[in-house]
């Protein structure tokens, strides 16, 4: 459950993404490679990306550099088998597959107070036969704010809080958005989808495009989407209101999302730009149901040491040409490299206290 055992059956992308959760030896080697290799045409490194996150968002040693506040969950994926028409991946055969996961809030401060408008993440790790895994990193926004790693790095700096106010400088933000029309367009789309009152009612998006590969090698572009089945949630208040509500909902009964593959049209729908939404009329395939049945404090026995690297893929799934995918993978690895050598004071959320 803790991600320490990496099977040789994982493909090369999976091995690269998983290297930093395989043990101390892999951490030192993989961390160096990811930290020093440049990302994108400007040779922006993962080290610089994570440095930027720390400078802008703050961090506490021993915790993730982004989405620091989180809680572990577990459950299953009930596959309908409908995905088999697109991909030879074993996860799309009819059946039930165990999963572990993590709900989180954006930002580098693990003890931050929940807010209703907080950006939320949902990381998933689905265990498959023969040692394969499928990991997903999803957010509750329909598009990403940045078209490249450099844009992400620069926007992070532009939105950094002013020390005198504790809030981003409005003029600096305005100037940045004006100079980045893709970010401006993405923010308009995001504003049309305000956050819901809970994790359980949030729609989560994979943001980046992927390729489904069938047994004949035919490739189909897709984006992942999780649509909630829960409509009645338990209200909560206090500093951890979103997580307390989630804990109460899970203890009341399983919380479910439909996993949807949105099928793109090659040459029409961009696969290399996560700031652009695909048309709403694109074909949708119901792949199955994500069922969350347990909630727990993060530990080494569940997901504390797991990178929810979206490039950990089973055979039958492949990355698209989206450059942000490679950047996310490298930055996650660099973040892990740093926190693996630090000691966390304590977990920010204890499941038994969320009542």
Image (cartoon, helix red, strand yellow):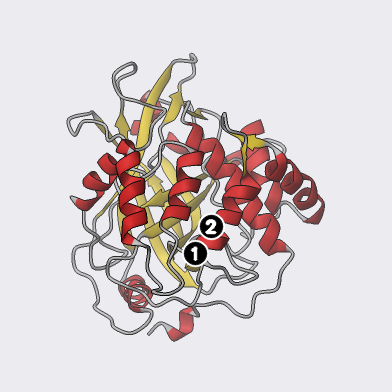
Q: Whole-percent x and y of residue 174?
A: 30, 51
Picture quadrant of residue 39: top right
Q: Is residue 331 left or right of residue 241?
A: right
Q: Whole-percent x and y of residue 11?
A: 64, 32
Asked if disc 1 and disc 2 are in contact, CB closer than 8 Å, the reply is: yes
Q: Report the residue at 46% width, 45% height from top.
A: 152
The local secondary structure at tag 2 comes to helix
Q: Whole-percent x and y of residue 126?
A: 51, 48
Q: Quadrant of the C terminus?
A: bottom left
Picture quadrant of residue 128: top right
Number of residues whose C-alpha sits closer than 10 Å to that of mark 1, classed few (under 14), some (14–19) or many (20 or more): some
The span from disc 1 to disc 2 (Cα, nearest Å) is 6 Å
Q: Report the residue at 34% width, 18% height from top.
A: 266
What residue does disc 2 label? 53
Picture quadrant of residue 14: top right
Can residue 7 be seen at all in this image of the molecule?
A: no
Q: Quadrant of the N terminus?
A: bottom right
What residue does disc 1 label? 57
Q: Nearer the viewer, residue 45 or 199?
A: 45
Q: Is residue 42 left or right of residue 84?
A: right
The local secondary structure at tag 1 comes to helix
């Amino acid at each position: 459950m803790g991600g320490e055992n990496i099977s040789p059956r994982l493909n090369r992308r999976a091995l690269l993404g998983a290297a930093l959760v395989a043990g101390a030896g892999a951490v030192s080697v993989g961390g160096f490679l990811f930290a020093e290799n440049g990302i994108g045409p400007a040779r922006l490194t993962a080290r610089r990306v994570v440095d930027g996150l720390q400078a802008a968002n703050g961090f506490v040693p021993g915790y993730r550099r982004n989405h620091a506040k989180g809680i572990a969950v577990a459950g299953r994926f009930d596959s309908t088998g409908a995905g088999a028409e697109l991909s030879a991946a074993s996860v799309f055969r009819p059946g039930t597959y165990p999963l572990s996961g993590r709900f989180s809030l954006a930002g580098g401060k693990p003890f931050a107070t929940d807010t209703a408008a907080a950006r939320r993440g949902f990381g998933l790790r689905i265990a498959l036969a023969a040692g394969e895994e499928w990991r997903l990193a999803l957010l509750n926004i329909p598009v990403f704010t940045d078209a490249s790693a450099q844009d992400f790095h620069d926007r992070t700096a532009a939105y950094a809080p002013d020390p005198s106010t504790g809030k981003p400088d409005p003029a600096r933000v305005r100037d940045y958005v004006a100079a980045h029309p893709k970010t401006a367009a993405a923010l308009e789309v995001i504003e049309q989808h305000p956050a819901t009152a809970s994790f359980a009612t949030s729609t989560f998006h994979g943001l980046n495009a992927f390729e489904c590969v069938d047994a004949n090698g035919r490739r189909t572009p897709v984006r992942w989407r999780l649509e909630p089945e829960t409509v009645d949630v338990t209200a909560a208040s206090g500093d951890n209101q979103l997580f307390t509500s989630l804990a109460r909902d899970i203890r009341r009964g399983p919380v479910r999302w439909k996993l949807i593959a949105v099928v793109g049209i090659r040459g029409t729908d961009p696969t290399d730009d996560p700031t652009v939404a695909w048309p709403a009329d694109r074909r949708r395939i119901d792949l199955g149901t994500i069922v969350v049945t347990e909630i727990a404090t993060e530990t080494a026995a569940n997901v504390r040491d797991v990178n929810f690297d979206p490039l950990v893929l089973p055979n039958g799934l492949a990355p698209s040409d989206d450059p942000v995918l490679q950047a996310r993978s490298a930055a996650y690895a660099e973040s892990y490299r740093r926190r693996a050598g630090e000691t966390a004071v304590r977990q920010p959320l204890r499941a038994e206290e969320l009542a």
